Amino acid sequence: MDQIITGALKFMQDDFKKYKKLFENLASSQKPHTLFICCSDSRVVPNLITHTEPGEIFVLRNIANIVPTYEQSDKFLDIASDIEFAVLSLKVKNIIICGHNNCGGCAAVYKKKETLKNMPNLLHWLDPIFSIKEKVLHESNTDISERALLTERLNVVNSVENLLTFPFIKEKFNAGEIKIYGWHYMIKTGEIFNYSFDDKKFHLIKKEAE
C-alpha cells in the first residue's frame, strides 16, 4: 500500500501538472467517444493499449469481459446500466469488447465446479462461458493453449452478439451510428487482434480495424 500512497502523492505533486489543462476542461463533463468493455485483469490497461487520454474512453470492466443478453439485463444491472449510460447518454460512437490471452475467467470453466464452490458468485457469473466450453471441446483438439485461445475469442464473439440483442444498440449499429469491435489482446507480445464480421475470424489490427 505504501507504493500506492507514494504514487498518489507523486501524481498530485508532479504528474497532474502535465494534464492540468485537460482536467480543467473535463471537470464539468465528459464526452468519451468509445465504450471499452474489458476484463478486470490487472494486466489489461485500457488507456495504455489504446494510447488514449483521460476523457476519451468510458471503461466497463468485469471478469472475462462478459456481456449478458438484453433478456438477462435485469440480473446484471451493473453491466446493462453502464451500456445504457454510455450509448444513450454519453452517445459513444464505438464499442470495443476486449478479451485477452491467459484469461483466468475463461480458464476457470475447465476446472471442476467443486473447486469454485467457495466462490458461488463467480461460478454464476461465468455461466455463459460454460456453454462456450462445450463448443470448444467439440471443435478443438486436446492442445491446452489452442483450447484457451479459442475459448477466449469465442467469448469475445459471444459478448459482441449479446451486445446486439440490446434494441437501442442494434438500431444504432444497423443505422451506422455506432461501430462495434471485438478485440483479443496478447499480453506477452502486445498484439491486438480484431474480429471481422465478414469472415468471422480475428485479424491483427492494421492501420484501421474494419
Image (cartoon, grey):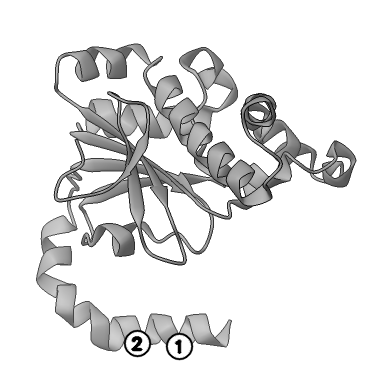
Left or right: 149 with respect to 176? right
Q: Are marks 1 and 2 in contact (CB under 8 Å)?
A: yes
* Distance in Å between CA atoms under marks 1 and 2: 6 Å
Q: Residues within 10 Å of mark 1 (few under 14, many from 20)?
A: few
Which disc number belongs to residue 6?
A: 1
Q: Residue 7: image x %, image y %?
A: 42, 83
Residue 128 quadrant? top right
Check the picture and name the quadrant holding the C terminus: top left
Left or right: 145 with respect to 98? right
Q: Residue 107: image x %, image y %?
A: 67, 47
* 119 versus 94 height, above or below: below
Left or right: 149 with respect to 53? right
Secondary structure state at the residue bearing disc 1: helix
* 85 versus 103 height, above or below: above
**Amino acid, disc 2:** Lys
Q: Nearer the viewer, residue 89 or 57?
A: 57
Q: Residue 68: image x %, image y %?
A: 52, 25
Which disc number belongs to residue 51?
A: none
**Amino acid, disc 1:** Thr
Check the picture and name the quadrant holding the N terminus: bottom right
Residue 161 quadrant? top left
Secondary structure state at the residue bearing disc 2: helix
Residue 80 quadrant? top left
Q: Residue 147: image x %, image y %?
A: 63, 42
* 73 versus 102 height, above or below: above
- Residue drawn where x is 84% and y is 37% of the image: 113
Which disc number belongs to residue 10?
A: 2
- Residue drawn where x is 37% and y is 33% of the image: 201
